Image: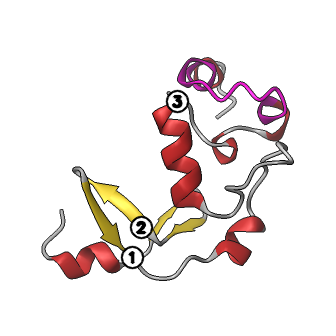
Amino acid sequence: MIASVNDLLTPISIFGYSFTGQILISGVEVECMECKKDRNLNNCNCTYEPCSRKGVCCDCIAYHLKNRELPACCFPDDAEKTWDRSFEHFARLVGAGRV
């Protein structure tokens, strides 16, 4: 639970990535600490080469969620290479015990 606005300024870590920069919480844009893009790129398994969001996890997650998808980092490498990032594909992988 968020106790104060200062709690929103703490970087969020999910799947080994640090989310910083501008985020949207309940329709309100909040400015967070600086992006850790270089560190995030070390964990990024996205194989889509023209992607401009690599390492900028807040933008990546926002983009994929808007399209009812999850980012590459949620998938095993072989599943990620199919570029099927849908919730349904993820659910099949969970059902098969692969995630």
Q: Place residue 72 in its image quadrant.
A: top right
| Real-space CA distance between mark 2 and mark 1, rounded to the nearest whole angstrom | 6 Å
Amino acid marked by disc 2: Gln
* Residue type for callout 3: Asn
- Magenta region includes residue 82: yes
The residue to which callout 3 is attached is 67
Q: Which residue is situated farthest in the left direction here?
A: 3
Task: Determine which residue is flagged by label 2.
Answer: 22
Establish if 23 lies above or below 77.
below
Where, quadrant-wise, is the C terminus in this rendering? top right
**What label does residue 32 carry, if any?**
1
Q: Secondary structure at mark 1?
A: loop
Q: Nearer the viewer, residue 64 or 94?
A: 64
Q: Position of residue 97 (x, y in %)?
A: 65, 26
- Segment tinted magenta in the rendering: 79-91
Going from N to C along the chain, the mark reached first, 2 or 1, is 2
**In the shown orientation, is residue 76 left or right of residue 1?**
right
Q: What residue is rendered at 56% in x and 31% in y?
A: 69
Q: Are marks 2 and 1 in contact (CB under 8 Å)?
A: yes
Left or right: 37 in relation to 3:
right
Q: Amino acid at mark 1?
A: Cys
Mark before the other along the chain sequence, 1 or 3: 1
The residue positioned 18% from the left and 62% from the top of the image is 1
